[in-house]
Structure formats: C-alpha cells, structure tokens
Amino acid sequence: MNRDSTQASPAKLNPWRILAAAAILSVGIGILAFAMTSSTAAQKDFISYWAAGHQLIHHGNPYDGSAILALERSAGFTDSRPFFMRNPPSAFFLALPLGLLSAKSGVVLWSLALIVAMMTSIRLLSIMHGRPPGRLHLVGYLFPPTLACLLAGQIGIFILLGVVLFLYLQRTRPYLAGAALLLCALKPHLFLPFGVVLLAWVLMSKSYKVLIGAFAALAASIALSFFLDPAGWSHYTAMARAANLENEMIPTVSLIFRLAVHRNWLWLQFVPAFLACRWALRYYWNNREQWSWTDHGLLLLLVSVLVAPYAWFTDETVLLPAILAGLYRASRRSLLVFSLIAGIALVEVLFGLKINSGFYLWTAPAWLVWYLYSRPVITKEVATKGATIPMENA
C-alpha cells in the first residue's frame, strides 16, 4: 500500500496576476534580446546544444569535433577545442529546435525556456505542499545550483522539471509521470539509486502505467535520434572515449574515491553508486508499505546525486524538491544552517568559480547532511501537534 502527500486542488486563476506575469515575461524577453549577443551566447554551455542542433538539421554528426568547433567559432567561441554536447542521442529532441535559429536568437529562446521550466517547477512544488504561507518558495530562484545553471545555460533546470513533474503526476497521471522521466534520461547517471528503486516500486506496486509512459517517451526520442543520425550512438561512444574524462577534474565524491584508491581504475567511480543502490533497495523494502515519493523519494534523490559517477555543481539543481520540502517544514535553527550553506555556495557562484573547481566538492554532501539534520526536528515538531510523519528506516 502506498502513501503519498495530498496535492492541493488548483486555485482559481486571477486574470490580473496572469496579465502581470505576461508583462514581466515580455519585459524579460526584451531585455534578453537586447542584452544578449552572439559572443555572449558562445561562452555559455548553450553553444554546445546550438552547434549540435545545426548538425542535426543537416543530418550531420553532432559529435564531429571539427564541424562543431567551426560552428561554435562562427558564433564567437574562443576556445581551441570543440565544446561537445555530452548527452546521449536521446537528447537530440532538445538540441534540434536550436538548429533553426541563429546563436543570438537561440540563446534568448533557450534562456526563456530555462526560466519557464524553473518557474513551473517551483510553482508545482509549492502546490504539492499545499501552498504554505510566506515566501519560502522564492528560495528556489536563489538556490545556488539553480542560479549557476541559469547563468551557464545548462540543462539541469530541464531535468529538475522532469523530476518535479514525476513527483506531481505519479499518483494522478501515471502515464504522463512516466513520460516526464525522459527529461531525467538526459543525465541518467544522476539517478542510479533513484532509478533502481523506481523500477522496484513499479514491480511491487504494479504501477505499470508509469513504466509504459517512460518507455513510450524514450522510444519516441530514440526513434527521432535514429532518423536524425542513424550512427548517433556510435558517434556518441567515440566522442566519450576521446573526451579523456578519466583525467578531467569533476568535483564529486566518486572521483575522490577513485583517486584515493587507484587513479587509473575508472570503474572505481561507480563503486559509491553501486553501494548506494544496494542501500536504496533495502531502504525501499523497509518502507514499502508506506512508500511516498514526495517523502522517502527525496532522500533517494539526495543520495543519488551525492554518489553520481559524473556530476557538476549545476546538476545539483535537481535537489530543489528536497531542499524546498526541508525548508517548508524546518525549524528556525535548521533554517539558519541552510542559510549558511547556501550563502557560501552563492558566494562561490557569484565570484565566478569554474564549474570544475574543487571548491564545489562539499556542496552535495552538505545538502544531504542538512536534510538529515532537519528531519528529526520536523518529526518532533509535527508530532507535538498531533500529526505524524513517517520516519526513515535506513
């Protein structure tokens, strides 16, 4: 038997608020269009998707280094090495529309899509928690990984939207919830323990509609990739091998583990994820009778990102559901602790630390420790009011 938090019924739309939001969005588009230049766009992660999109439009190889570099340099890219889209061919659907646009127009559309995805995610999370009073949901707009993602033009916000849509729809619209997981498949390595438990949950609870929705969306995406580039998967494999990832500085726990044991054994980076998957299955089994994706699933999300074999600070954007859940129910003391953690991370972002800086190594463990620290306080406070919140049985 599954238990999940009750979703609030949608509130009536206020036409004045809609007009105000539309006006703000229009002004934002105008500012983006005026302030953004091709050279500015070329320095963002967006440029890798734009170049891949142009290759796909002409049925070219989106992982062809010389072609990608030529396109990127035409937009003002200054590096001597091509900036590849490192996502698998199942992400072609995301890059394809950019192939129809110039770099300037593309980055405006891309930035707007990121903003809309972020606003939608934060609003849905607020609805899921019954629209709590106050303005804590605004923290989502200043959550350091989310802000870094927006500034860099990274796809982490789209992946966040996939996570939120799954959490929001998995009880009422299981087919759509499964389809939303396609956005998570843009970076599947971020969700290994989460994905293992998801499959176990589908089988145990017979929630096959979620699985059908996920397979249908993924099949459509793969079919599109074969149409655009029949050799896309072999091209992707060749690019990944040539990228020399084993020598790249990736501020993750998994990389530190590999360096501490044996630098040349790349498979060691998957050991933390493997151990976490074993823990996750036990965690699910102990809580299967009252399993809740909007409660137990959030801890899985935090652990999954922590042990990911390959992840950047911007990828921690997907942790926003857990962060807001903790903030909505946290004590004053845990709010102060969160403010300290987020404040330090925000300073790092605003000072322009590069994404591969070792100074970002601490953030994923910090979000998890803060979440665990806040939960006993949450349970104690709610219990005094006569309500109960299930405790994790790790």
Image (cartoon, grey):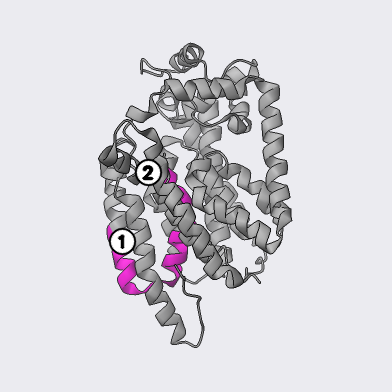
Q: Can the viewer see residue 171? A: no
Q: Quadrant of the C terminus?
A: bottom left
For marks 2 and 1 on the same chain, the one whose residue lies earlier in the sequence: 2
Q: Position of residue 386 (x, y in %)?
A: 50, 88
State the SS at label 1.
Answer: helix
Label 2–label 1 contact, CB within 8 A: no
| Figure check: 260 above or below 35 | below
Residue 330 lies, in percent from the top left, at: 39, 71
Residue located beneath label 2 in the image: 313
Label tally: 2
Look at the numbered disc 2 and give the secondary structure of its residue: helix
Region in magenta:
312-340
Q: Is residue 390 left or right of residue 182?
A: left
Which residue has dot 1 on it? 339
> Magenta region's main secondary structure?
helix
144 is higher (above) or lower (below) than 83: below
Q: Is residue 36 visible?
A: yes
Q: Amino acid at mark 2?
A: Phe
Q: Residue at x 31, y 49 (%)?
A: 346
* Residue 379 in the image, given as x and y percentages of width and height: 43, 78
Q: Foreground mark, 2 or 1?
A: 2
Residue 361 image-quadrant placement: top left
Front-most of residues 32 and 337: 337
**121 sits to left or right of 172:** left
Number of other residues with Cα within 10 Å of mark 1, as a class: few under 14, some 14 to 19, many 20 or more: few
Residue 127, given in percent of the width and then of the height, sits at 58, 64
Nearer the observer, 320 or 311 = 311
Q: Which mark is residue 199?
A: none
- Real-space Cα separation, disc 2 to disc 1, in angstroms: 18 Å
Q: Quadrant of the N terminus?
A: bottom right
